[in-house]
Image: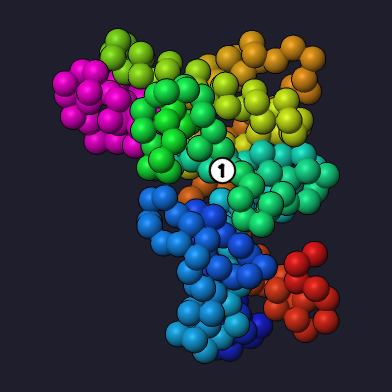
């Protein structure tokens, strides 16, 4: 961020995986492969500027919470669906971090004994409902390669039975995971982001219906699409750096 033209005061960086924002360490990433990396101090040394290190999805959730689809809510689940799946939780207006471990919804088991996940467990949500999983499942089922989950969604609109079967399986897995989170945290709003949310009603309509089928006494959340799209994480990183710089200037604790 800059406080006036030409002068940079702080850098905001967000990364995937398990991130301890307080210690400024990238604890673990199943997809990238790093473990307990002092990334904040490394970036600070490289840039010569103070660095705020955060989690990409929590930062994106913070941006949606302050500027986007969740700006009028207090209890929110933000879940982007891309190559992987993660989530950001806000309860009573405060982010749930759990030392960086909170929100790893992509590694909730929704199919015990299912396909092996990169994290080492089996049947994780990511193995059924991520954009990468949908693409691979369609190719395996149909014998035809496709260029991403968006192509599967396009085939769905043309009545392709293989696309329908793969899509239904992904939606069922997402509904199962969201029902569990709803039971535990009672969000009033669920915001879907990432590339798969670009399918809009093709995803949100059946997912909304199947989630409601799984709920009985629970609070029934509203399910909407992200307003900030791919910019959510970048905006969240900027907000994080801006807040930290302000807190440093005023003497406030940047962790609160």
Examine the image and state in which quarter residue 222 appears: top right
Relative depth, front residue between 115 and 135: 115
What residue do we see at 65% from left, 26% from top?
180
Regarding mark 1 in the picture, which secondary structure is present there?
Answer: loop
Q: Is residue 177 left or right of residue 181?
A: left
What residue do we see at 73% from left, 45% from top?
90
User: Label 1 crowding class (10 Å Cα cut-off): few <14, some 14-19, many 20+?
Assistant: some
Q: Is residue 108 magenta?
A: no
Give the x, y percent position of residue 249. Answer: 77, 84
What residue do we see at 64% from left, 23% from top?
179
Residue identifier under label 1: 104
Answer yes or no: is residue 197 visible: yes
Answer yes or no: is residue 201 visible: no
What residue do we see at 73% from left, 51% from top?
95
Q: Check the picture and name the quadrant holding the C terminus.
A: bottom right
Give the x, y percent position of residue 100. Answer: 62, 55
Which secondary structure class fits the magenta region best?
Answer: helix
Give the x, y percent position of residue 170. Answer: 44, 23
Relative depth, front residue between 10 and 107: 107
Residue range highlighted in magenta: 127-156
Relative depth, front residue between 59 and 184: 184
């Amino acid at each position: 961020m800059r406080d006036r033209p030409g002068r940079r005061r702080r850098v905001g960086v967000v990364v995937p995986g398990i991130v301890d924002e307080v210690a400024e360490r990238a604890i673990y990433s199943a997809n990238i492969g790093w473990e307990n990396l002092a990334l904040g101090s490394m970036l600070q040394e490289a840039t010569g500027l103070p660095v705020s290190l955060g989690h990409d999805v929590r930062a994106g959730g913070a941006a949606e919470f302050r500027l986007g689809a969740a700006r009028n809510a207090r209890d929110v689940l933000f879940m982007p669906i891309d190559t992987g799946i993660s989530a950001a939780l806000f309860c009573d207006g405060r982010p749930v971090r759990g030392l960086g471990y909170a929100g790893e919804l992509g590694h909730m088991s929704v199919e015990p004994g299912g396909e092996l996940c990169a994290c080492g467990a089996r049947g994780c949500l990511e193995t059924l409902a991520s954009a990468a999983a949908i693409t691979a499942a369609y190719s395996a089922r149909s014998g035809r390669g496709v260029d991403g989950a968006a192509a599967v969604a396009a085939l769905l609109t043309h009545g392709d039975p293989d696309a329908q079967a793969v899509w239904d399986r992904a939606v069922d897995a997402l509904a199962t995971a969201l029902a569990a989170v709803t039971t535990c945290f009672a969000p009033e709003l669920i915001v879907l982001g990432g590339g798969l949310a670009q399918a809009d009603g093709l995803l949100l309509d059946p997912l909304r219906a199947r989630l409601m089928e799984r709920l009985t006494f629970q609070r029934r959340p509203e399910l909407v699409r992200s307003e900030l799209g791919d910019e959510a994480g970048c905006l969240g990183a900027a907000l994080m750096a801006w807040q930290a710089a302000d807190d440093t200037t005023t003497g406030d604790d940047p962790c609160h």
